[in-house]
């Protein structure tokens, strides 16, 4: 059987490709992000999800809850994904200079590649139970997560256009015992080194403005306004993520709390991926919106990091606009269940 989920991008979509460019949308980039989020969900529900970089799962050695679906050595993935009817286009030509947003006071900035904007369809082929799970996963990502790579730079926020059809599929194979679309996998405690939704927080900032040039006041954007203006005009998106990260990291974080690289990432000396993902500003349903998530990995800084991210004063300082912030922090299996079911 098959299902088709029609996607409309709200921020650029990036799936990688040859020479680190996104020459086209690649199914492997989509599958990689689906697996990463599914691992976090399974762990958040107390289940077994291996670290795929360690290669410990295999048909002979045994399969964790995630590898049973996404495959491992000797065990084929239980679904096939195809990108069809791809109508996305790069927001600027890959041969153009990469957009470098450098807020005041920084000698280096954030380099943003030309992800794609537009519409595409994801076709999943598999048995009904697996297709139901894929629909539920995408509905969760539509509201809380990201699709594809570079979520830390604000890429991969999307809307599902045939949402009613996706909902029918997601609710098609409820757990017979609990009546839930998602089931509790077990009682395993969180592993501090692996993403687990019980250590995540989600946030969303909504605002309205009648000033078309509001974004020129965002730190770092005025100096690249000639590159940003066409993007704002055509796609109604603004790359505010570097300015927000700059404020959080360099103006709000106190280094006595811990190494800022642990939460905000670094490329040197060893690469550490940022635990904070915040989107570009995008206009949808008549309002501007910025959303994101944080993996509160370390208990040493979790509370302090979370307090910075959901401080509305920080958002107003950066965006120069008043708005409303909504936050959702998870600490238990019940929290995870409630959030997952709320997306359905």
Image (tube, helix red, strand yellow):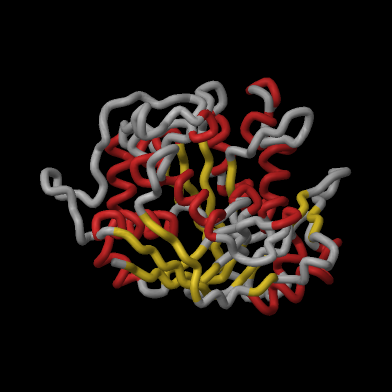
Residue at the image point whose x is 50% and y is 64% from the top = 158
Extreme-left residue of the structure: 177
Where residue 106 sits, quadrant-wise, is top right
**Quick check: 220 left or right of 197?**
right
Q: Position of residue 231 (x, y in %)?
A: 71, 72
Instruction: Give the answer, above or below, for where 194 lies relative to 327.
Output: above
Instruction: Give the answer, above or below, for where 267 lies relative to 10.
Output: above
Q: Position of residue 190 (x, y in %)?
A: 40, 26
Q: Position of residue 178 (x, y in %)?
A: 14, 44
Tell me, yes or no, if residue 59 can be seen here: yes
Where residue 41 sits, quadrant-wise, is top left
Instruction: Give the answer, above or below, for where 4 lies relative to 50.
Output: below
Quadrant placement of the N terminus: bottom left
Where residue 320 sits, quadrant-wise, is bottom right
**Quick check: 177 left or right of 18?**
left
Quadrant placement of the C terminus: bottom left
Tell me, yes or no, if residue 303 can be seen here: no
Q: Position of residue 342 (x, y in %)?
A: 30, 54
Instruction: Give the answer, above or below, for where 231 lies relative to 240.
Output: below
Residue at the image point whose x is 62% and y is 59% from the top = 14
Front-lying residue, 318 or 228: 228
- The mark tally for this picture is 0
Residue at the image point whose x is 58% and y is 38% from the top = 275
């Amino acid at each position: 059987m098959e299902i088709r989920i029609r996607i409309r991008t709200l921020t650029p979509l990036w799936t990688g490709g040859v020479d680190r460019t996104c020459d086209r949308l690649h199914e492997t980039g989509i599958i990689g992000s689906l697996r990463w989020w599914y691992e976090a969900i399974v762990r958040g529900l107390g289940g077994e999800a291996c670290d795929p970089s360690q290669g410990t799962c295999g048909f002979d050695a045994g399969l964790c809850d995630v590898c049973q679906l996404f495959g491992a050595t000797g065990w084929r993935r239980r679904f096939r994904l195809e990108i069809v009817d791809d109508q996305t286009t790069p927001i600027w030509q890959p041969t153009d200079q990469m957009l470098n947003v450098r807020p005041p006071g920084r000698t280096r900035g954030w380099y943003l590649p030309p992800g794609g904007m537009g519409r595409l369809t994801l076709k999943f082929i598999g048995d009904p139970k697996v297709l139901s799970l894929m629909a539920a996963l995408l509905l969760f990502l539509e509201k809380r997560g990201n699709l594809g790579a570079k979520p830390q730079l604000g890429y991969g926020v999307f809307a599902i256009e045939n949402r009613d059809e996706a909902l029918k599929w997601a609710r098609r194979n409820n757990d017979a015992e609990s009546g839930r679309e998602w089931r509790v996998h077990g009682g395993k405690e969180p592993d501090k080194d692996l993403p687990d939704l019980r250590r995540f927080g989600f946030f969303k900032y909504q605002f309205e403005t009648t000033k078309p040039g509001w974004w020129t006041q965002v730190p770092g954007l005025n100096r690249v306004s000639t590159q940003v203006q066409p993007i704002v005009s055509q796609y109604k998106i603004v790359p505010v993520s570097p300015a927000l990260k700059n404020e959080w990291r360099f103006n709000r974080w106190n280094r006595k709390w811990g190494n800022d690289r642990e939460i905000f990432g670094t490329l040197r000396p060893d690469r550490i991926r940022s635990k904070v993902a915040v989107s570009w500003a995008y206009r949808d349903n008549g309002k501007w919106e910025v959303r994101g998530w944080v993996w509160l990995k370390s208990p040493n800084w979790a509370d302090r990091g979370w307090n910075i991210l959901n401080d509305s004063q920080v958002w107003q300082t950066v965006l120069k606009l008043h708005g409303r912030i909504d936050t959702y922090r998870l600490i238990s299996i019940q929290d995870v269940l409630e959030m997952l079911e709320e997306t359905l």
